[in-house]
Amino acid sequence: MRRASHKTMPPLNLALVGCGKMGSALLNGWIKGKIEADFTVINPSPLSFSLPRSVYYASSVQSAAARLAKADMIVLAVKPQIMAGICADLKPLVPETALILSIAAGKTIQSFEQVFGPAQPVIRVMPNTPAAIGKGASVAVANKNTSPDDKARTTRLLECAGTLDWLEDESLLDAVTALSGSGPAYLFYLIEVLSEAGIRNGLPPDLSVKLARQTVIGAAALAEENPETDAATLRQNVTSPGGTTEAALKVLMNGEMQDIFEKALSAARDRGKALNQ
């Protein structure tokens, strides 16, 4: 895996198709990152938040036809289950030179080339929801039709919302989806589990939830501040021999936690593969 190189992105016409949780997270990141673009947002249902006045909103692909005809980039942020219908609607409206950037789990580059044509530039990306606050983790794969400018624009868009890495092997994106794409949910669940355990050990509910949230936030911040220190060392730094942390870790590490996470990631990876069937 190689990290993306940074390059100033020229202004572009960008259409975001789908503005749910992930689409809106990216849009918020772009706006906060002051991306120079003429944004078009296409979403069939009313949005639960207000768009800046500079962003053009359309409720259907057809009603945005004139803007799509001028688009440099189409970001597809709809659910995999409805992707085929959306792409069929877009096909006659999108320029052959426009970059198709998909963030849908399981949908391969080949599936987009089959709809838009073998010469269409396509990049497949797996981001995650912390992109909304500039803390996202994204991984991308490009087809052979993408230009250096296409990749530079993608890099600028995604680095303003967090980190971006590029892969050559598209098959690894299902594992990326399982780890970082779905990963925030695992940590939110950890907060739930920790807070519930604290309550069962006698802590007031409000305090237990607060401590669980802040502990995860603080530990993540420590990891971020010490990028050269691996997680095992950070864990050992907190663990005194014969102490309370060691007692808890013996339970966690002698149990099935590693196996559970491996099974969970495998299930997510396999589901991603199934979504392309």
Image (spheres, rainbow, N blue to C red):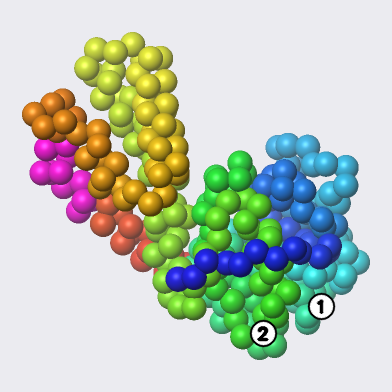
Q: Label 2 amino acid?
A: Asn
**Residue 110 placed where, x, y %?**
56, 82
Q: Earlier in the sequence, mark 2 or mark 1?
A: 1
Residue 214 image-quadrant placement: top left
Query: For the residue labelled by badge 1, is the local secondary structure a helix, a strand or a loop?
Result: loop
Rendered image: mark on residue 145: 2
**Residue 150 placed where, x, y %?**
71, 73
Q: Which residue sits at x=62%, y=50%?
A: 161
* Residue 203, visible in the rendered structure: yes
Residue 97 higher or lower than 11, as above or below: below
**Residue 81 placed where, x, y %?**
55, 63
Magenta stretch? 247-260
Q: Decide whether the magenta segment is chiefly helix, strand or loop.
A: helix
Q: Which residue sits at x=76%, y=64%?
A: 9
Real-space Cα distance between discs 2 and 1? 14 Å
Which mark's residue is nearer the viewer, 2 or 1? 2
Q: Residues within 10 Å of mark 2 (few under 14, many from 20)?
A: some
Residue 198 higher or lower than 217, as above or below: above
